[in-house]
Image (tube, helix red, strand yellow):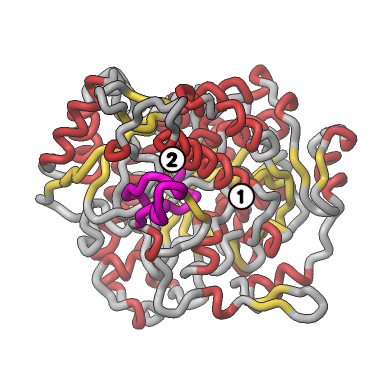
Amino acid sequence: MKDIDIAKQVILKPITKIAEDLNINTEIIEQYGRYKAKLPLDIIDDEKIKNKHLILVSAISPTPAGEGKTTVSIGLSEGLNRIGKKTTVVLREPSLGPVFGIKGGATGGGYSQVLPMEDINLHFTGDFAAIEKANNLLAALIDNNIQSKTRSLNIDPRTVTWKRVIDMNDRSLRHAIVGLGGTSSGIPRETGFDITAASEIMAILCLAKDFEDLKTRISNIFIGFTLDKKPIYAKDLNAHGAMTALLKDAIKPNLVQTIEGNPAIIHGGPFANIAQGTNSVIATKMGLTLSDYVVTEAGFGFDLGAEKFIDIKCVSAGLKPSAVVLVATVRALKYHGGKPIKELESEDLDALAKGLENLEKHVENMNKFNLCPVIAINKFTSDTDAEIQIIIDKCKEIGISVEVADVWSKGGEGAINLAKTITKLTERCNSKMTPLYDWEWSIEKKMETLSKEIYGAVAVDYTAKAKTDLKKIKDLGLDKLPICVAKTQKSLSDNPKLLGRPKNFIVTVRSIEIAAGAGFIIPITGSIMRMPGLPETPASENIDINIDGEINGLF
């Protein structure tokens, strides 16, 4: 059956029952119908968090064949609950861009899903809409000030970097000119749209510790310069109060359930190739307050989401993962070994062996952070015993634990061995997370360390534009912030065509953006962009609703 058909067979528990299972007073949750609720921030207890276990799920470099981090994360949380470990899975919210673009649904798969999957995939509790409105309010205030004759801050329109956002893949909006139509319609200037998941507001929401921190971060958003070269921030437009007010509900994590009736917290959704790629700090701490184990995932491969999870989120919030699961599939490894996408279901031991170079590099990267790793082989029905054995043998060779996770077809039952391995790892592993770099280092040193150590590059090159951006950042005193590299997810390098384990390549930084509110700097590499386009045949063509209000086509 398709994912949505499996989901429809499940009899959901009322969300009040899920809250009771977490020992939450049901009178303090804010219900969005029978199966969704917002959780108040005052539940978080930093003292309770100290002795809890945070399990990070990452993956090898993504391929069109899929790796299934979310599916494994959900399945692992089910498995941990089955062996008596009180566990909550904490995930990001899906963006409508990928849902209508390539992915379809983004709430796990098979018998390893979070529910209600239709609601979660389509609008959910309105968090993305609130983030979009807060972002676009600032854009409107900027253009209004540029137009103003009495309260003008003398903003130089050519330096304004803030764009509008929309939660949709729409390449036609990447570049736009606003203010056309005469003097009553504003001052013409070039701008554009980003996708909502790439908005700095999304990044801020996911790194904020509370309302006060959220407001402070929003006030520090860098907008551009005045005509006499003075920096302008959101606070100079008195924008931060109203923007924070728009996020008063969006800052609260969302409580839902897994297919087996266990708790799931879903909150925030920044992409990992253009932002930090992890759910909110608030949601993670909420899960750790309420459970003994929290399973969470970081977007794309370990070189993107997991690196940012550690170097940005964990350092900022004082979090430390107890163990890291690296998800790999036979199909994806064969793709990295050069096998065409249409032939991945046929056995090919040579391509698989060659593709293992990608897995091996990600394992090396995990060890650089002094983490306790385990490999999860996300099983597909087309996998052969010989192929799975090759991966197991490789893991034994490099000295890393490995388990087969058959969570798509078996749910929590298919993750019991993985769950047992994780619990043993958390009990005996003495490793302590070590960030890759010190925030106090120069941007150049941070970028070089990341590029050489994690990506495997031999050098970093900067365009003239990037060098100008570096000087501007240093002049603003923002060079001691961590870096959040925008890079293709398809390769360890900045070239999506270089699969497996690329060598002897140079990372080219085209430009560097400022996210002062979020608290990081964004080096832009390769041809990465912040507004995706739709594929030739969008997933939206398969999505429909019948006369009874039942949604179909979310795979």
Q: Residue 234, how many percent across, how many down? A: 46, 28
| Membership of 305 in magenta stretch | no
- Judging depth in this view, the residue of 278 and 133 nearest the camera is 133
The amino acid on which the numbered mark 2 sits, given as a three-letter code, is Asp
Q: Residue 451, how many percent across, how many down? A: 21, 40
Q: Is residue 404 above or below residue 36?
A: below
Q: Can you tell which quarter of the image residue 414 is in? A: bottom right
Q: Can you tell which quarter of the image residue 28 is in? A: top right
The amino acid on which the numbered mark 1 sits, given as a three-letter code, is Ala
Q: Is residue 364 above or below residue 51?
A: below
For the point 62% across and 53% down, the residue is 74
The residue pinned by badge 1 equals 129
Q: Which secondary structure, mark 1?
A: helix
Q: CA distance from mark 2 to mark 1?
A: 21 Å
Which region of the structure is painted magenta?
176-199
Count all numbered tags in the image, as a single digit: 2
